[in-house]
Amino acid sequence: MCILPGMTLLLREADVLRVIDMDAVIGAVENGMRELGQGVAQNEPRRRVFAPGGLLNVMFATYPGGGCTGLKAYPVARGTARFLVTTFALDGTLQALIEAEHMGAYRTGAASAVAAKALRPSGTVTMAIIGTGMQAKTQVLALSRVCDIRELRVFGRDARRRETFARDRQEELGLRTVAAHSAEAAVRGADIVVTMTPSAEPVLEAAWVEPHALVIAAGSNYPNRAEIPADLVERARTVVVDQLAGAQIESGDLIKAEAAGKFDWDRAAELASVITGKWTAPAERGITLFESHGMAIWDLAAASVVLPAARERGLGEEIAFFEA
């Protein structure tokens, strides 16, 4: 038996939380999308297989700029998911196994920030977020890094949770934050609207959305769920998806709008095309919709900054693999 060259690092959630930095993740995700648009990186859409009582999700990519290739896998059973990102060096060496619930929340927020940098209205903005879970927290954190937010409005169905969420965001980020009494109160007048919910039905109405607003729909990646009504998709002057191949499989917002005759896939631009300048913005601004479903290259981008930071601080558990 001999030890393969190099050591693999196992990082637990607590290790990730000690080193993850939103600014660094935003930069890595933006670079990953640029490489994807340039044809340097590759990303495959999520694949799902179903078993009694649950399902397994697998997604994979290459990110040469981060020196890695790899995958994220996560089973979902009884309403619970466990996330694992596996990264390999470009020479095939197994680099790391990373528990990735928190890293996934950061990379999803980072992707919204990357989209907002390119698509947001200019100047200071009022932001509305519908949803009060962990993913909503990282959406606000990430967008606060790239937008000058004059007011944050929060809505969730549970009054106590939305009050707590609003108070915590104000204390953490120094933002003027309002716990809205309804989704409509949150959305009307907002320049940026983010939905981060598991809802199967739309959580807002098209008439509430300002004609210049950026809407980020980030909560759903199942074809039978829709946070955004078909009328809003129809109203949007610009529709940007994270990746067209994935959106056509799992964007319930767009799939349902197409079925209603209110959307055609020819209207959709990919975020990588926006980042590389291959997409040209319409001359007259209207509603801009960004459909975020999740990409493995975002996970690799996040891992590419978490892993060296963890090694520098001596975190994680080293694992040796053997071959005969």
Image (spheres, helix red, strand yellow):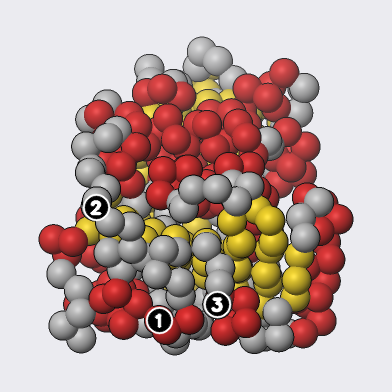
Residue 303 to residue 250: above or below? above
Q: Which mark is residue 282?
A: 2
Q: Which mark is residue 206?
A: 1
Mark 1 or 2, which is nearer the eye?
Answer: 2
Secondary structure category for the residue under label 1: helix
Image quarter in which the C terminus is found:
top left
Residue 6 to residue 155: above or below? above
Secondary structure category for the residue under label 2: loop
Image coords of residue 121 (percent x, y): 46, 53
Choose the circle earlier in sequence order: 1 or 2. 1
The answer to whether residue 106 shows anywhere in this view is no
Choose the circle earlier in sequence order: 1 or 3. 3
- Type of amino acid under label 2: Pro
Crowding at dot 1, Cα within 10 Å, few <14 / some 14-19 / many 20+, comes out as some
**Could you tell whether 291 is left or right of 301 in the image?**
left
Secondary structure category for the residue under label 3: loop
| Rendered residue at 34%/52% (across/down) | 242
Crowding at dot 3, Cα within 10 Å, few <14 / some 14-19 / many 20+, comes out as some
Question: Distance of mark 3 from mark 2, alpha carbons?
Answer: 24 Å
Check disc 3 and report the residue beneath it. 188
Residue 276 to residue 164: above or below? above
